[in-house]
Amino acid sequence: MKFPLIAAVFVLGCVLVPTQAEALDFAKNIGGQNDLMLPYDVEVDSQGRIIVTNVMGVNSDMGVSIFDPSGNLLETFGSFGTAPGEFKSPTGVAIDSKDRIIVADKQMNSIRIHDKSGEHIKTFGGIGSEDGQLRSPFGVATDSQDRIIVADTNNNRVQIFDSEGNFVQKLVDVGSDENYMNYVADVATDSQDRIWVVDAQNNRLVIYDKEGKFVKTVGRQGGGDAEFYFPQGIGVDKDDRVLVSDQLNYRVQILDSEGNFIETFGYQGNDDGRFMVITGITSDLAGNILVADQSNNKLSQWGSASSQIDPPSQQIEAGPEDTEVKKIPDWINNTMQWYLDGVISEDEMISAIQFLVKEGIIILD
């Protein structure tokens, strides 16, 4: 009964209309128990290498794991300890314009800078609440000037340092809002060097301009669009879309550059395409989204059809009232192939078709 179902979609006089954005599909997992040990954060350097911090990896000399763009493990570095090149609990990771690997060590209350090969360069920070001191920093980011922005988690603030780790300023203002930041989990910067902050306990994002001036907050507690339940990680892709690990909603949310909801993906579970304890998030050079899932010891990669290698798209001739040949999007071809291969059920295929009709992607005459 597979072929008649698929054929029916195309013999009923369907006309395909363009969409505003391509759907994101689960692509593959990267890592696993041998390559990752409680992965916390993920970043991608200028060569496309995938750099991942492992909270428990320090016991096996893999505080940081480095993968090639295809997800093959290249090397690891960072054993347990306090000496240069060692970690106690590596969490956030950032990459600067020189491909230096910058790691936040929450237990050491410090930021550690390494070259692209993992050789230690310097450490800065230290426990405390004074300017330049840190308390359990979980997240770190860099901007276009190679300034280092730190989520100073247990001090409920963000601190900005220059590229060598010298204190520049701190961010605590949230405008007239009486709810000051509570548990700053992560930070990211966009193309304008605006700073996006994950204010986890307040279930929102806080935005500052490049000078450190408060702009606005985005989100509130809940399970709806642009609502969060203990968000943990944040990233910004090349199109300035904001990617958020919405941890206790077991999903990723994608927002535009002003914080408006675009789409969401992911569900609770241990299977492919499902999440349990998600933290760090970023996008690779091809536009795929990478999500660190601690509980499942893996990175989950998601991408649109344009970022995956797919067979050539098919074409259908225009109907009598049409004036052009229109393409069947590759991601629709993928869905049909999954159905033919038995990856998804007939009911799931029917649901997909109903969704396409509802969204106006397919019009039945």
Image (cartoon, rainbow, N blue to C red):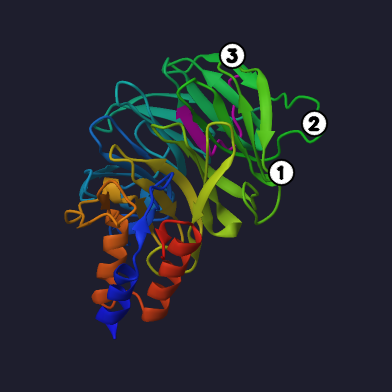
- Residue sitting farthest toward the left: 312
178 over 194 or under it: above or below: below
Q: Quadrant of residue 120?
A: top left
The quadrant of the image that shows the N terminus is bottom left
Name the image quarter holding residue 156: top right
Is residue 312 something that shows in the picture? yes
Count residues near mark 3 (Cα–Cα under 10 Å), then give few for <14, some for 14-19, many for 20+: few
Q: Residues within 10 Å of mark 2 (few under 14, many from 20)?
A: few
Vertical relation: 206 (above or below) 221: above
State the residue lying farthest toward the bottom. Answer: 1
Identify which amino acid the numbered label 3 is placed on. Glu
In the rendered image, residue 174, in percent from the top left (x then y), is placed at: 73, 27
Q: CA distance from mark 1 to mark 3?
A: 24 Å
| Residue shown at 34% from the left, 53% from the top | 321
Q: In front: 323, or 336?
A: 323
Decide whether the magenta segment is chiefly helix, strand or loop: loop
Please name the residue that numbered disc 2 is placed on: 177
Q: Please provide the residue range marked out in magenta.
A: 129-141
Query: Residue 275: x and y, percent?
Result: 47, 61
Q: Residue at x 28, y 56 (%)?
A: 328
Residue ID for mark 3: 211
Q: Secondary structure at mark 2?
A: loop
Residue 304 percent across, percent down from the top left: 34, 50
In whole angstroms, how far apart are the C-alphas of marks 2 and 1?
11 Å
Alpha carbon separation for disc pair 2 and 3? 20 Å
Q: Which residue is mark 1?
A: 202
Q: Residue at x 52, y 56 (%)?
A: 251
